[in-house]
């Protein structure tokens, strides 16, 4: 379950049915890869929508580029989709009656991990202390994520990463 995606769904402009379907997929997504594989019958049951309505909404997400085919369906396995929320239109932040901004929209991920907020005026890129700790086993590639399948499935211990960072720097 990716609580990160479940929370981010609220920051985008969607219809109520689209939001319900996207919440169901986000609830089943892998936190590291954003890949979800719930069956359409389960999504229809979770959202109280008809099966064909859920199928129509999923096809719409695929056409808009929100869902990317990660793994085609096979016998007894549903289609796996990688979820890209960056393809959706973001909401404006919530402003209460006093004029104060209460909610923030999710900022798009930048390719520069040292920049905290690219929209602020004084943002400068800061080199991370340990560059390999940014995402040690996930490599960003043109907006999609792919797991680096090196030794031991791409995962390294913190000690290995720190030793490598100290030897480089």
Image (cartoon, helix red, strand yellow):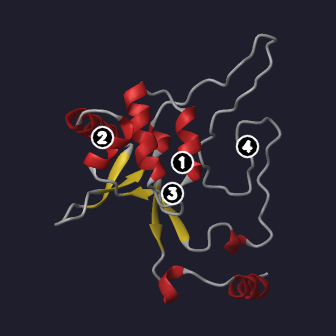
Which residue lies at the image location 69% right of the left edge and 88% below the top edge? 160
- Label 2, label 1: how far apart the Cα atoms are: 19 Å
Left or right of 162: which side holds 7? left
Q: Secondary structure at mark 2?
A: helix
Residue marked by disc 2? 44
> Badge 2 local density, few (<14 within 10 Å), some, or many (20+)?
some
Label 4–label 3 contact, CB within 8 A:
no
Picture quadrant of residue 132? bottom right
Q: Which numbered mark, 4 or 2, is in the foreground of this view? A: 2
Which residue lies at the image location 76% right of the left edge and 73% below the top edge? 130
Q: In the displayed orientation, state which residue is furthest to the top.
A: 97
Label 3–label 1 contact, CB within 8 A:
no
**Where's residue 62, x and y in %?**
30, 43
Q: Secondary structure at mark 4?
A: loop
**Where's residue 95, x and y in %?**
72, 18
- Label 4, label 1: how far apart the Cα atoms are: 19 Å
Q: Nearer the viewer, residue 78 or 153?
A: 78
Q: Nearer the viewer, residue 25 or 120?
A: 25
Q: Which numbered mark, 3 or 1, is in the foreground of this view? A: 3
Q: Secondary structure at mark 3?
A: loop
Q: Which mark is residue 117?
A: 4
Q: Which numbered mark, 4 or 1, is in the foreground of this view? A: 1
- Label 4, label 3: how far apart the Cα atoms are: 26 Å
**Where's residue 18, x and y in %?**
38, 32
- Label 3, label 1: how far apart the Cα atoms are: 9 Å
Label 2–label 1 contact, CB within 8 A:
no
Q: Which numbered mark, 2 or 3, is in the foreground of this view? A: 2
Label 4–label 2 contact, CB within 8 A:
no
Residue marked by disc 3? 1
Q: Which mark is residue 5?
A: 1
> Badge 4 local density, few (<14 within 10 Å), some, or many (20+)?
some
Q: Which numbered mark, 4 or 3, is in the foreground of this view? A: 3
């Amino acid at each position: 379950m990716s609580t990160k995606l479940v929370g981010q769904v609220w920051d985008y402009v969607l219809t109520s049915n689209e939001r319900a379907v996207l919440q169901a997929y986000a609830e089943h997504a892998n936190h590291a890869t954003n890949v979800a594989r719930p069956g359409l019958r389960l999504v229809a049951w979770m959202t109280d929508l008809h099966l064909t309505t859920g199928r129509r909404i999923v096809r719409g997400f695929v056409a808009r580029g929100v869902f990317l085919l990660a793994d085609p369906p096979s016998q007894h396995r549903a289609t796996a989709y990688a979820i890209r929320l960056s393809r959706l239109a973001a909401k404006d932040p919530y402003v209460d009656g006093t004029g104060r901004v209460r909610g923030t929209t999710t900022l798009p991920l930048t390719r520069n991990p040292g920049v905290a907020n690219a929209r602020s005026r004084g943002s400068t890129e800061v080199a991370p202390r340990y560059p390999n700790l940014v995402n040690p086993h996930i490599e960003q590639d043109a907006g999609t994520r792919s797991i680096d399948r090196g030794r031991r499935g791409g995962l390294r211990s913190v000690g290995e990463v720190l030793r490598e960072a100290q030897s480089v720097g």
